[in-house]
Amino acid sequence: MIELRGLRVAFARRRSFGEVVRGQLAPSVRAVDGVDLELRRGEIVALVGESGSGKTTTGRAIVRLGPISAGQILMEGRDVTAIRGVDLRAYRRRVQIIFQDPYESLDPRRSVTDQVAEPLIVQGIGNRAERRERVDRALEEAGLRPVALYRDRYPHELSGGQRQRVAIASAMVLEPDVLVADEPVSMLDVSLRSGILRVMMDLREQRGIGILFITHDLSLAWLIADRIAVMYLGRIVEVGPAEILVRDPRHPYTKALLSVMPSPDPARRRKRAILRGETPDPSLIPAGCRFHTRCPLVFDRCHVEDPPDFELGEGRRSACWLAEGGEPLPDFPAEAPRLASASAHHASAKMTADAASAEPSLVELDRRP
């Protein structure tokens, strides 16, 4: 349904004092750097990576909420990368987004009914009575029952979970074909997350919409997604069916993320791999493989040649030289040769803590084919 081909998004950066003195131009920030990805009808694809990897920028580009520097976005084979005006409005009717923070995405001065009805007004859909009917249906599908209890409330009268359900209703009232969910549960209490995820999975099953689920939590992605795409420094480094990717990762970055994913079985313990070194500046992406500055399995070729995407069968691909022969990755060495800085330790610890916060109740969710 949606296909990204070589998508690139770059942002201009203000020149430093040294660059001004030397008369140099500031390098652009390559937030998204050649992303290829496909989202099919009725499929949930999880886009996973640590903060700053380009996940949200990719999602915003799909909805056409930001600049696109190069590449293509195809909707059912039609190039929508540069559409404007009426065509863009029609496209956004079919492609909607749920933002990460329900406390910021809702207007505090408008009631629930007004906020959910706004997309219908912008698109010129229905009269007042028809819009009211569609708003009530969207609120009901989002789990705000009875609807009469919530219609006239304002955001300050709602809990965090209820706010996010209003945001979901606002996106679903247009009955879109594609939904970009940008970390929709990261701002919610653990007790509320499974309810929101259940709403999204039910909407996928009832309406057959395709969902791009953006998250930094690989364990959450494994629970709800059909396929997982792992992103690092603006590029998708591995993609494949969720079960296969989790069982047999073919990129060292994926393997490191999996090592900190909590297991529901206390007898099954993984050896955690804490990545060392600093994440490179996206305006100064290193030569060769962009992950080689932190990779525990780095070797000489990684420093000079950027690996292509190697097709591994079963819908999998990996951008790692070790995947070239189709063999499983070797184990990480017991001790990495580089010393980690304090900030690197802090980033790794945060990633570990975020993964460990996945609630046990999510294990009860059914994974659907």
Image: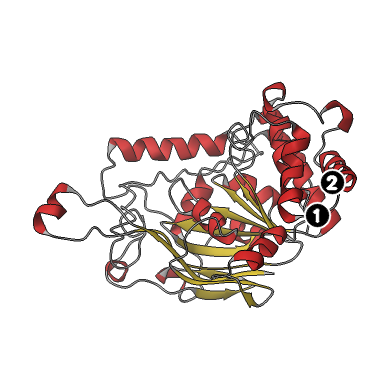
- Quarter of the image for the N terminus: give it: bottom right
x, y percentage for residue 307? 39, 72
Q: Residues within 10 Å of mark 1 (few under 14, many from 20)?
A: few
Which residue is identified by label 2?
Answer: 131
x, y percentage for residue 126? 85, 52
Q: Quadrant of residue 186?
A: top right
Please state which of residues 351 and 96 is positioned toward the viewer in this rendering.
96
Which residue is identified by label 1?
Answer: 125
x, y percentage for residue 89? 66, 61
Q: Quadrant of residue 129?
A: top right
Do the residues bearing badges 1 and 2 touch, measured as CB atoms within 8 Å?
yes
- What's the residue at 71%, 51% (across, down)? 122
- Three-letter code for the amino acid on which mark 1 is drawn: Ile
- Quarter of the image for the C terminus: give it: bottom right
Badge number at residue 172: none
In the picture provided, is 260 more to the left or to the right than 227?
A: left
- Please, what secondary structure does the residue beneath circle 2 have? helix
Whichever of callouts 1 and 2 sits on the residue coming sooner in the sequence is 1
In the picture provided, is 76 more to the left or to the right than 233?
A: right
- Please, what secondary structure does the residue beneath circle 1 have? loop
- What's the residue at 26%, 43% (across, down)? 339
Rendered view: 140 above or below 30: above
- Three-letter code for the amino acid on which mark 2 is drawn: Arg
The outermost residue toward the left is 21
x, y percentage for residue 168? 72, 43
In the picture provided, is 122 more to the left or to the right than 324?
A: right
- What's the residue at 47%, 40% (across, down)? 351
